[in-house]
Amino acid sequence: MIIGEFSESYPPHIDGVGMVVRSYCEELSKAGHTCYYIAPRNAGKEYPNAEPETFPVIKYASIPIPNEAYSVGLSAFDLSFQLDLNHIPFDIVHAHTPFVSALEATRISRERHIPLVATLHSKYYDDILVKTHSEVIARAVVQRVVQFFNKCDEVWTVNDATADVLKGYGYDKEIIVMPNGTDLWYPTYEDAKKAELRFDLGTGPVFLFVGQQNFKKNTDTILKATSIYKKNRGSGFRTVFVGQGPDAERMRQMSEELGISDVTVFTGHVADREILKGLYARADLFVFPSLYDNAPMVVREAAAAGTPSILIRGSCAADGVTDGENGFLCSNTPEDIAACMERALLNAKEVGANARQTIPIPWHGIAKQVADRYALLIDRKKHEKR
């Protein structure tokens, strides 16, 4: 098959959706398919030492958004991009966004009468409400999102909780649940020790967060919980934040204001996967209280390292996690997160071992399910033509 995976972001910029699309392209290419990663060119935001991809990538012109990690795509005005896209004999296209890239995927699907798949990865109502502070605008955007999904041949979500979010937006057609994957690996003592020395983590407990430094991820609540934990247990621990984002500087300021700068480590963006794996391995607990994320890959990556997560009870991120068995659940308050940090340390290793057994799904297995579903849709579309 010749497949087009359309996204609104492109690694090495840290973005969960981009990493999912990247994994799709890698694994489908390994299986013998030709899989294109299609996304905007993140001008000025890519890392010069990034390793070359093992699959074809097509980028279109874009304009950076001030104070944001993303950019606005200008695909319709990029003639070179349009020519490249028009010469690729796609069998199927998959939109991982309902915005600019989705317009291109829709155009290709209509012109060539090939299947269009779309996946809901993000809570768009929440995104727009935070940016505009207008429920009217947020509802209008969500209505447009649902209109796009209604045009697709098939719609996927990453778990049942995210399917409920989409139904809440007003989408009433069939939804296919296609989970995200991650690959199991077995960290060594040396992996953990390298991270410990590199970031001066000491030998005490380490609480880790990986993702955008953005308050929509509840990162301010982690800082407040760290302050409470320090008052209760002293300073013989570290809370580590990996990533970058619009609130990175404000988070540093908060750590100073809360009196926790001595126990808080901000690593910035970590492009080297081996270093990131070492951090997962060294961490005792992965603290991820986000109410925004649907099926975060970082929770699966932590589980693959045998590191259990602290998640908010009832959140989409907590789907598939049972408190005290393969993770830890708490309420969305700094006090309860801090208390959970204390109690979770008592049996973190045992729960982490269960998390490794129950949470990660190898990407090659997911890619097989994806490819089978694509083939089914392609055959169905051919019958419709006849």
Image (cartoon, grey):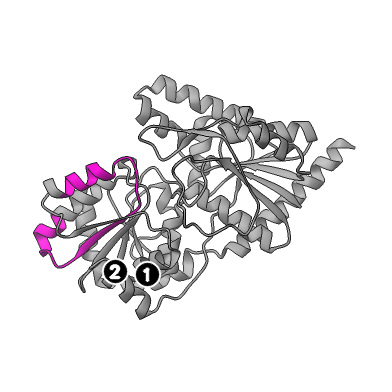
The label on residue 198 is 2
Dot 2: element: helix
Q: Is residue 224 left or right of residue 297?
A: left
Q: Residue at x 10, y 64 (%)?
A: 234
Instruction: Decide whether residue 240 is among the magenta residues.
Output: yes
User: Where residue 39 sits: x, y (%)?
Assistant: 57, 41
Q: Residue at x 54, y 49 (%)?
A: 158
Q: Residue furthest front?
A: 48
Label 1: few (<14), some (14–19) or many (≥20) C-alpha neighbours in 10 Å? many
User: Where residue 362 sits: x, y (%)?
Assistant: 56, 65
Nearer to us: label 2 or label 1: 2
Circles 2 and 1: CB distance less than 8 Å?
yes
Instruction: Decide whether residue 287 is among the magenta residues.
Output: no
The label on residue 82 is none
Decide which of 303, 110 is in the foreground and name it.
Answer: 110
Q: Which residue is mark 1?
A: 278
Residues shaded magenta: 228-255
